[in-house]
Image (cartoon, grey):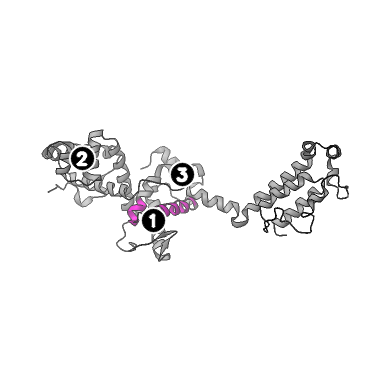
Amino acid sequence: MRGNTRDIEQLLSRLAEAHRDGAFASDAVRHPWEAVQSRKASGGRFGWVRVAVPIAAAAVIAIVFLGPSLLGTSAVRDMARDGLAVIQPDQPPTVAEGELAVASDEHDCDFNGDGVVDGRDIQAFVDRLRVSNGAAMEKSEELQRCLLGG
Amino acid sequence: MPDRSERELLEAMGRGDDFAFERIYDLYQQRVRLAAWSASHRPDWVEEIVSEAWIRAFRQRTNFDASRPFLVWMTGVVQNVYREACRKSPTTLGDVPMQDLAPRGGRDEPSPEAVASEAELLAALDDCVRRLGPEQSRLVRLRFFQGMTLRSVAKELNTPESTLREIRIPEIIGQLRRCLASKGVRVEDVFPAQGGAEPQ
C-alpha cells in the first residue's frame, strides 16, 4: 500500500532536519529553574558572606576548644584545662604574641595581605589563630564586621 | 490525553509539588525542545528559549490547569519567550548573536496546538525510527537523513531501485505508520491537507 506515504516521508525529512539542527541533542543545564533558585538563595554578589561567616565562626570555635590540645604545648594545655578562660580579654599572652601584629590593628582585616578583604582572608585568619592564644572571639567578631562591611 | 499517572503528576505539579514538576520535565523536555525548534526555526536559540520557558513554567506551575494538554501550555510559554526575545533584543538573545533575523511572531505564527502537535509527532516518529531493524534503519538514514537519491541508495545497498521504491520503502512507511498509531499519534493532525494524498 502506497497511500499516505508522502506525509510520512515529509515527516522523516523534517525529523532529519531537526536532528541536523541539534533539536534532539541537549547540553542544557538539567532543571534550569534550579539554577535560578540557587542564585536567588545565595543572595547574588554577597551571597558568599552568608556561607563564609558561619564557617569562620565554626572554625574559630573549633580552634578555641580543640586547638590547644592539638598544639600540645604546656601553655596551651593549661588553656585547654581552663576552657573558656582563653576568651578573656585580659588573659596574658603565652605564645607567639608577635604573630597577631597585623590582625591586632584596628579594622585591618586583610589577613592574607593581598590588599583586599574577602573570603580568602578567612583562611589566613584561621591560620593566625592557630598560633595565637587569646582574643579569638574578639578577632572573629572583628573579621565578621569586616566581611559584612560593618 | 495523559495517562492516569501523568495526570496525577500534572495535578500534583499544579499544587506546587516540585518532584512532580521534575518528573514532568523528564517526560516532556525533548518535546518542548522540538516545539522551541519548530516555533523559532532558530537552532542557535533553542537552548536559551527552552531554559527560559522551563524557568517560567516552574514559576507559573500552580496556574496550570491539569485538564488541558501540558505540551500545548508549554508551547504557549515557548512562543511567548520567543516573541519577547525578538522584540526585546535587536542583536542578541542572551549571548547568542542574531543573524539575518526575521521574527516569525505575528498573524502567520502557528497556534500552540499546531506546534505542539508537530513536536509530539516528531518525537514519536523518532522513537519509531529507533525501533526499526538495522537494514531498515540504514535505508532511512541514507534516503531521508542524508538526503541521497533513490538511485544512490540503491547502489549503496546493492539493491534494485525498483525494489526500494515498490517494496522496501513502503514497508518501512507502513511500519512507521503502525508504530505512530500505536502511540495514539495522528499524522493527519500535522498534515491535514495531505491526508490520503498519493505521491506523484
Residue behind mark 2: B173
Image side of residue A58 versus residue B64, left or right = right
Amino acid type, callout 1: Trp
Extent of the magenta region: B35-58
Is residue A104 visible in the rendered structure shown here? yes
Q: Secondary structure at mark 2?
A: helix
Label 3 packing within 10 angstroms: few (<14), some (14-19), many (20+): many
- The residue closer to the viewer here, A64 or B15, is A64
Work out whether disc 2 and disc 1 sit on a shared chain: yes
Q: Residue at x 30, y 42 (%)?
A: B126
Amino acid type, callout 3: Glu
- The disc, 2 or 1, on the residue closer to the chain's N-terminal end is 1
Give the chain of mark 1.
B
Majority secondary structure of the magenta segment?
helix
The answer to the question of whether label 1 and label 3 lie on touching residues, with beta carbons closer than 8 A, is no
Callout in the foreground (2, 3): 2
Image side of residue A125 versus residue A32, left or right = right
Indicate the position of residue A43 as horizontal and vertical percent values. 60, 55
Magenta stretch holds residue B106 = no
Magenta stretch holds residue B45 = yes
Instruction: Name above or below for residue B91 compared with residue A86.
Output: below
- The disc, 1 or 3, on the residue closer to the chain's N-terminal end is 3
Q: Which mark is residue B45?
A: 1
